[in-house]
Amino acid sequence: MERVNKYRTHNCSEIRESIIGTRVTVSGWYENIRDHGGVKFLDLRDHYGIVQVVIHDENLIKSLPKESVITVEGKVVKRDEETINPKIESGTVEIVCESLTVLNKVRTSLPFEITSSKSVKEDLRLKYRFLDLRNSEVKNNIVLRSKVISFIRKKMEEMGFLEIQTPILTSSSPEGARDYIIPSRKYKGKFYALPQAPQIFKQILMVSGFDRYFQIAPCFRDEDARADRSPGEFYQLDFEMSFAEQEDVLSVAEDVLYETFTKFSDKVVSKPPFPRIPYKEAMLKYGTDKPDLRNPLEIIDISDMFLDTGFAPFRKKTVRAINVQNCSTQPRSFFENMLEFALGIGMKGLGYIKVDEEMKFFGPIDKFLSDEDRKELINRVNLKPGCVLFFIADTKEFAPKLAGQIRTELARRLGLIDENRFEFCFIVDFPMYEIDEETGAIAFTHNPFSMPQGGLDALLNKDPLEIVAHQYDVVCNGVELSSGAVRNHDIDIMVKAFELAGYTEEDLKNKFCALYNAFKFGAPPHAGMAPGIDRIIMLLTGEENIREVIAFPMNNNAQDLMTNAPCEVTEKQLREVHIKIR
């Protein structure tokens, strides 16, 4: 005998014309009601959709608050033509209510309207996240997230990757961000740490003989929140490959990302192979290592033109220029607003010249240019009638970054960004080392376990700041989705690489003991990367804040307002783990 569910024979989205005349049972949340002169029309919502219920006996819902959970029984009928709602799947039919059972009544006033929860202050939404998630827009982001992760899993398995879980409780190691640490009850004064990434474990899996590993990995970093970064935890598609070179990894990433974005978006997705842009070129042409390639503007270095100029702000400075076509007719307010923006990001001014239809120059910088300068600019930056050339001058360190921000702002104000495209690229050839701003010492720029290009010879014979690593990022529309690297699998190269960053071999043994020991037993060449799941979903949904695509996010102050985390614990709990608050 077939079992019958007493709560529903159909879900709300299954109420269609094909079952007109059928007696059905549906359950869900009472979302809204409309009174049409003695007849009431109730919107019933479940996970799958909304259906309209016609109620002739108003006593059935008298004093019933919205969002109460109810079961309705009745017959499916076709709606009158003038009442058809094309916005919902069940919009051509309705249920004539014969009986209504209240399963759970709302006992207090709602903190906000469910259908408009996205316009409510974020902290209130997060406190009542269980209500916020009833909003179809919010819920659909989480549904999409589930579908994307499922698709990625299948894709990785098809490509021969094996899903393996790595530990959540591990040891603290210096990997770039603050650890979340957990006191040990059994070992007084010692601590576990939550993994910032499965970095060491996935490399050890390669040493263990597994060929292709992946997991949808949780990562934990005690970092401040940003619009594209969640405090506390985030998820990434973590994968690693043995006997692999850089192009092997980039090829896998291209395949997975292209297939994912084309399946779950109607936007145009750049086709593989994605451009490979060296770090130095990216910083010169775009002023950032996260370039938005939808922006057609490029930055040009013209520093050599102004080494001995009489114009003091440019003399012996790094000078960048951005040529914007068809811009000379912009109103005066446009240039004033750009100057205000430039001052706001720390620039001392924003010079520019306009080119009219007769190729004559105008603007605040023109009087400092010679005829030879004008000729050279026309040739070097392809000036044409209607162009405006903006100038950014600062130190070697800051000029590229400032130029990048001006490039982005110009494109935004001029509407040059095609919002209907996903443009991918790889940034490659990152510098291995940089100068630490606080200490002035040499430090790792990227992942400390990366292989330097040129191997041990480069480490022994090159200026550390000139050494380039086999490191790469994947970027989409100006958002960094992933970092990765060909790993340093040779213990001699690793010791020297860490030595240049101020670590002794003893430090390496102590801080990275597992990897150090494993590499003594024959490590294969290996490489990998880890695209961020949260950022992928954020791009696919078009959301501007990463918290919109996480089921239970913390707020930007790293608080879970729904569960009141972080919270105090009892003195007994503290004593058990040998902790005293001071």
Image (tube, rainbow, N blue to C red):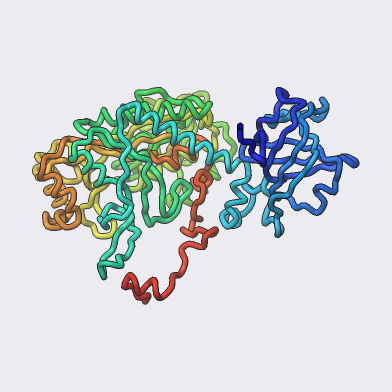
Give the total number of marks visible in the rendering.
0
Residue depicted at x 55% and y 33%: 415
Residue depicted at x 45% and y 70%: 568
Q: x and y percent of residue 140 in the render?
A: 57, 38
* Closest to the observer, 512 or 94: 94
Q: Is residue 238 left or right of residue 344?
A: left
Q: Is residue 275 above or below residue 196?
A: above
Q: Is residue 120 above or below residue 413?
A: below
Quadrant of the rendered structure where residue 30 is? top right
Q: x and y percent of residue 43 in the render?
A: 74, 40
Residue depicted at x 51% and y 43%: 549
* Closest to the observer, 175 or 513: 513
Q: x and y percent of residue 327 in the render?
A: 53, 31
Q: Is residue 285 above or below residue 32?
A: above
Residue sitting at the far front: 1
Would residue 107 be visible to someone looking at this image? yes
Q: Is residue 16 left or right of residue 148?
A: right
Q: Is residue 417 left or right of residue 88?
A: left
Which quadrant holds the N terminus? Answer: top right
Q: x and y percent of residue 55 in the render?
A: 82, 40
Which quadrant holds the C terminus? Answer: bottom left
Q: Is residue 338 left or right of residue 510?
A: right
Would residue 320 be visible to someone looking at this image? no
* Closest to the observer, 392 or 508: 508
Quadrant of the rendered structure where residue 24 is? top right
Quadrant of the rendered structure where residue 405 is? top left
* Closest to the observer, 5 or 240: 5
